[in-house]
Amino acid sequence: MKSNNQSNIHIPVAILIGEGKLITDGAAAHPEVSTRLPEGYLTQTGTVLTNLMTLSTGQKQQRGQAAVLRAFDALIVKRRT
């Protein structure tokens, strides 16, 4: 059972990646910020964002390919009838 103080937050992946990249780039550009972060934090966060971007792109490509196949299948069915 979910407690009352928890909520489901839905953030589009593109926004999550974009904002995360802005934050990590800003922290990397300003040593006064990056020195407050744990050792290796920026590297690990950058790796996670890159992996997330790769997975997101792969899913979009699969959906696009599926849509093309559905459209092609619909054309074939129309030609048969």
Image (cartoon, rainbow, N blue to C red):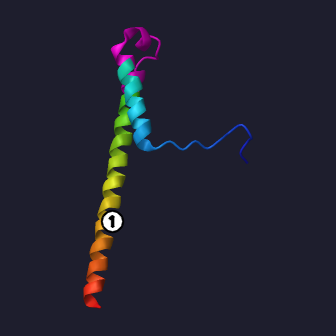
Residue 69 visible? The answer is yes
Q: Residue at the location (34% across, 36% down)?
A: 50
Q: Along the horizontal axis of the image, is 68 left or right of 14? A: left
- Residue 47 at x, y percent in the picture: 36, 32
SS category of the residue bearing label 1? helix
Vertical order, 18 against 8 (above or below): above
Viewer-proximal residue, 57 or 18?
Answer: 18
**Spot occupied by residue 33 in the image (x, y as percentages of width and height):** 43, 12
Q: Is residue 35 above or below residue 58?
A: above
| Front-lying residue, 12 or 47 | 12
Q: Along the horizontal axis of the image, is 65 left or right of 13?
A: left
- Residue that label 1 marks: 66
Marker count (numbered) = 1
Residue 57, magenta (yes or no): no
Name the residue rendered at 37%, 10% in the picture: 31
Q: Position of residue 12 (x, y in %)?
A: 46, 44
Q: Residue at x 74, y 41 (%)?
A: 3
- Tell me residue 54's x, y (percent): 33, 44
Q: State the extent of the magenta-drawn residues as a range.
A: 27-44
The answer to whether any part of residue 48 appears in the image is: no
Q: How crowded is the residue under tag 1: few (<14 C-alpha within 10 Å), some, or many (20+)?
A: few
Type of amino acid at the residue the image marks with label 1: Ala
Instruction: From this view, report whether residue 34 is shown above or below residue 60.
Output: above
Q: Kindly report the secondary structure that dominates the magenta region of the rendered protein.
A: helix
Where the C terminus falls, by quadrant? bottom left
Quarter of the view holding residue 78: bottom left
Task: Work out which residue is located at the far bottom of the displayed protein and give it.
Answer: 81
